[in-house]
Image (cartoon, grey):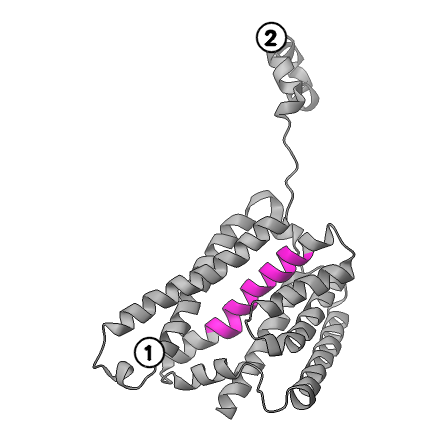
Amino acid sequence: MRAFIYFGGMMEVSEHKSHDDKQDISDPSLAQKPSIFPGILPTIGWIILYFVLQLVCTTVFIALGAVTEGTQIADSGANRGLAVLWGIVSSAIIQLLLMFLYLRKDSRFKKIGLDTFGTMPLARTFGLAFFLVVGAMLFNFLYAHYVIPGIGMQEEMAKMLASIPRTPVNIIAGFFAFAIAAPLVEELLFRGFLQNAFARFVPIWAAILLSSFAFALVHLQPYAIPGLMSLSIAFGYLYHRTGSLRANILLHILNNTAALLLTQAVV
């Protein structure tokens, strides 16, 4: 049939095909089924995989560090911080490679907005992003100072970073882990995959809230959930308005870079 449609001169060849061949081509059971992407269950699988990879990689680096007893790293008490850092770096590289291979199929880059900066003018996009992030930061400030005073947001992460020797290699690894890899993986998982998956079943505002709650929950800091959700809601709404995951990733990288620099300055 395809030969007849696109190449009329081959009609005679098509007519010589057997009845069985024609039946096979027109058989509905052989028709390609549309892929459901992104799905909720596959997305949950990707999220679980990310944290399993972190656990496995960190465990490996802790084990390697235990072999180096008597070294300067072991004596300084920085082994755990280094193991966590390099575990995050390794797991992020593996996860991003696997996700890249997954997204290459069926135009998935395009489906989640990785191929564009969105339909809005660039100036308007940055204006909306600035408004949303400032609003989320204001909420975080009020929440941290008046709701949970004395409990610093993500204090454990700051302490871990402070324990790591500030060598050039460690600084580069830390920047890659928290300012580059984390935004990439988190935006892919919680906006590109999870928010879009939820949006197939619930209104967009509910999809943003659900994916933002999941984003906050996986950080394993119950007292920080409202603050983390506020930032995630800002990212989710920006993604909904622009349709661009590129813009979200760029904004998330800028946000994490600023937070990392501020944390290191305070430390």
Q: Main secondary structure of the magenta part?
A: helix
For this view, does 118 lie left or right of residue 58?
Answer: right
Viewer-nearest residue: 16 or 133: 133
Residue 18: quarter of image: top right
Viewer-nearest residue: 182 or 9: 182
| Residue 115 x %, y % | 63, 56
Residue 193 belongs to magenta span: yes
User: At numbered mark 1, what does the secondary structure look like: helix, strand or loop?
Assistant: helix
Q: Point out the frontmost of discs 1 and 2.
A: 1
Residue range in magenta is: 176-195
Q: How crowded is mark 1: few (under 14 residues within 10 Å), some or many (20 or more)?
A: many
Residue to which mark 1 is pinned: 79
Residue 216: quarter of image: bottom right
- Residue visible at 38% across and 71% down in the picture: 86
Residue to which mark 2 is pinned: 18
Q: So how many labels did they put on this image?
A: 2
Tell me, yes or no, if residue 237 can be seen here: yes
Q: How crowded is mark 2: few (under 14 residues within 10 Å), some or many (20 or more)?
A: few
Viewer-nearest residue: 6 or 212: 212
User: At numbered mark 2, what does the secondary structure look like: helix, strand or loop?
Assistant: loop
- Residue visible at 28% across and 73% down in the picture: 65
Q: Earlier in the sequence, mark 1 or mark 2?
A: 2
For this view, does 9 lie left or right of residue 49?
Answer: right
For this view, does 129 lie left or right of residue 73?
Answer: right
| Residue 183 x %, y % | 56, 68
- Residue visible at 29% across and 68% down in the picture: 63
Please identify the residue farthest to the left as the structure is shown.
70
